[in-house]
Structure formats: C-alpha cells, structure tokens
Amino acid sequence: MSHVDIVVANASELLTMVGPDGETHGARRGAALGHVGVIEDGAVAIHDGRIVATGPSRDILASFDAGTLVDAKDGVVMPGFVDTHTHLVWAGSRAWELEWKLQGRTYREITEAGGGIPYTVKETRQADPDHLAALAAERARDALHHGTTALEAKSGYGLDELSELGQLEAIRMARGRIHQRLYATYLGAHERPPEHRDDPTPYLDEMRTSTLPKVAKRGLATFCDAFVEKGVYSPDEVRPLLIEAKRLGLKVRIHADEFNDLGGAAFAVDLGAASADHLLSISDDGIEALAGSDTVATLLPLVPYAIRDPTYAPARKMVERGCIVSLATDFNPNVPCLNMGFVVQQAVYAMGLAPAEALVAATVNAGHSLDPEAGLGVLAPGHPADLVVTDQATHVHLAYAFGRNHVRAVVAGGRHIPL
Ligand code: NIG
Ligand code: FE
C-alpha cells in the first residue's frame, strides 16, 4: 500500500473528463464534447498537488493509505471549473444600472449616458493596488466556494499606463493570497480612454510602445486582450498592438463579435489567438473560421442574461460545426457573478448545450484555452489535483437543479478545502 496525501472516495460519478479515446490533453470538439469519462463509485488518490490514480473506490482504497480521506458521500466528483474570462479587478459598483436596464436601456445606451466601463474606470483609477488586490482575492475566494480552481483576470479599468500596471500588480499580489491558479491578461484596449474618446491613436501608440513592453518585462501578464466592437476598437486599430504582444511572448484573447459582427472571430483566428470570447453576433464565416482553428470559442451566457437581451451565442451550431466551445462567467460590474455552476446551467437552459457538453466546456476546453500543457480540467495521473466534491448524484443533476451551489468541498493544488 502506498501512502498519499488525500484520497477522495465514494463518488457516485467520478467525472474524469478523459476523452472517448483516452485523451488526457487537448480540446474536445463535436461528439467528444459530450464525453465526461464517468467512473461509477469512483475515487481519486492525490499526492504532492498531483493526481496519482483514479478508479473504482474499492480499488483505490485497497491500494492507497491516505493522510486525509474525503468521503464524497455519493455525490459527483469532477475537475474544478476553469473560468477563463473574468474582470476581477475593479472598484465601486454599478448596481444602480439595474434600474436603467429595467427601463429598457441597452448596454451601449447605458455607457453613453454615464455608466458602463467609463464609470468603473473613474472608480478604479482612484483605488490603490493594495485595495484592488484585496478585492480580487476576496472575489477569487467566492469563485473557489463555487468550485473554480483556476481563473483568468483582466486589467482594463485603468485605460492609462499607471493604472493598468497597477491593476496587473494587484492581480500579482492577489495570487499569493488565494488557493487557485490565477492567470493575468493585459486589457488596456478595453475601451477608449476618456482623454482620447475621438481619436484613440495616441493611446494605442502608448500601449504598444510603452505599456506593453513593461507588462512583458515585469512578467505581469500571460495574455493581451482587446475589445473589438463598433465604437470601441476595430481589428485594424488593435492589430499592431496584438502582433507586438505576440512578439513579446504574450498570447492573445479577443472580445469578439459581441454586439456587432466586425469579423472578430476570423480576426482572432488570423492572430492565432488562444480564444475569441462573447460571439453573440458571430457570422457563419466566423463560425467556419473558428471550426478550422485551435482558437477556443468562449461563450459567456451570463452576459445576455445581465443585459436583458435575448440574443445568446449560437452554441449548438458552433458545436455541430466543430468549434472548440468553452464557457466562462465574464465576471465584471455588469455581470457580478463568479458561479460557474450557474454558467453551466445557463448554457444548458438558455443555449441548449447538453449537461455533459456544458461541463466539458467549463473544464477541459476552458483549461485548453488558458494553459494547454497544464492538464487543467482533466482528472488523470500527473494532472493538477484540482477538483470539487458536489452534493448531486449525477452530472445531469448538476445542470438540472439550477440556482444553487452544489459544491461541498474543493481540492485546489492538492489542498483539501472543506466548505
Ligand atoms: O466582457 N464587453 C466588454 N467588456 C466587458 C464588460 C465590462 C463592463 O461592463 O464593465 C465584457 O462583457
Ligand atoms: Fe469581458
């Protein structure tokens, strides 16, 4: 019998997320998206932050003697969620916008009337990095409570060099205070700064020639992102910035085709982006471009919900054409929710994904877009010991029973965190 740190046993279903042909890495498309790799009455052995073995509880309990035995009590055990799109760092609140939404105002109208990103920029510029780090850490703990064991966080509420770098510093500081892996994204091109509303050229130049080199040199971000949208930035405006980001060793993510189709999906593919996100207004050509690429389509079903717009991304079509579909919260002052379980439920009820598809999208495919070599979102030997214990008996129930948190315990980086 070998000794291990933790055994999690008695899972009604252990969702390993190992693919139909035994794949432990890489994205899942088409029919493979619906494959959760169930081991009934399953167990996982964990040592030194890694998974050592998975299998039927009887075999694992007979082979390993555990420092800590976690009884899953006939609940589903699955990989922790990977939330690849969050705006984790901002000050203030935009709760007051809800009243405007209820009056029927659109996201763009709210922005033009003094709300939206520019409002949060004003609040965030006044906050120091220590305060922002505390907010980010507190929000990451909320995400952990809902089963998220790896997440991405963007800057983008500074829109000037000093305050964008401050937000990335805040993300770095938060990293030491939380249990999850936290990946940083420089999103200086989130909006036009108030100082350069009419002509953003000087700001685009500043980002490319001054801020980005500092971000790269200080190792402050893995990714560079841009909001490609009518009235914000066109593909031509941000192309030089994103090409320079790649030259400096950053990877690219794009806010693409959210309200208007500016060819954002094809632009992301062209740049070899890790992901194209939102895609509510994606064209058929955009879908074909993504389907023929390794760029992950990140769908954010809480956005139409939050802005009270019935347009959801064409998730079924994208799965059927062979896009790599993943899911994320898009946590931000407009979408104040870090509950990936609710994202899965919305993906099923509002976008028509099957429960298994939504769960694979929120784990394996999300992990692939964030860190393709790390093995996030799959429970297999050698992979990170990031998993959740739930109080539901089947993976279908995780999607079916909406509106409550099913997570009972989390193992993050090999540490058991009872909730
Ligand atoms: O991803 N669409 C652009 N940016 C954010 C919204 C940020 C905000 O409203 O503060 C998004 O949804
Ligand atoms: Fe976003």
Image (spheres, rainbow, N blue to C red):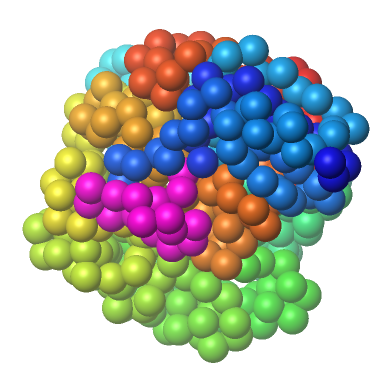
* Closer-to-camera residue (40/267): 40
Q: Hey, which residue is sitting farthest left in the picture? A: 284
Residue at 49% x, 57% y: name it: 24
* Closer-to-camera residue (359/299): 359
Residue at 61% x, 62% y: name it: 374
Image vertical order of residue 59 relative to residue 318, above or below: above
Q: Main secondary structure of the magenta part?
A: loop
Residue 165's x, y, as percent? Answer: 72, 63
Q: Quadrant of the C terminus?
A: top right
Magenta-colored stretch includes residue 114: no
On the picture, is 104 further left or further right than 413?
A: left
Image vertical order of residue 126 relative to residue 291, above or below: above
Q: Is residue 352 visible?
A: yes
Magenta-colored stretch includes residue 20: yes
Residue at 21% x, 63% y: name it: 291
Residue at 40% x, 51% y: name it: 19
On the picture, is 263 further left or further right than 370?
A: left
Q: Hey, which residue is sitting farthest bottom in the picture? A: 247
Residue 414's x, y, as percent? Answer: 78, 43
Residue 153's x, y, as percent? Answer: 61, 50
* Closer-to-camera residue (224/362): 362
Image vertical order of residue 213 relative to residue 90, above or below: below
From which residue to which does the magenta span run? 17-32
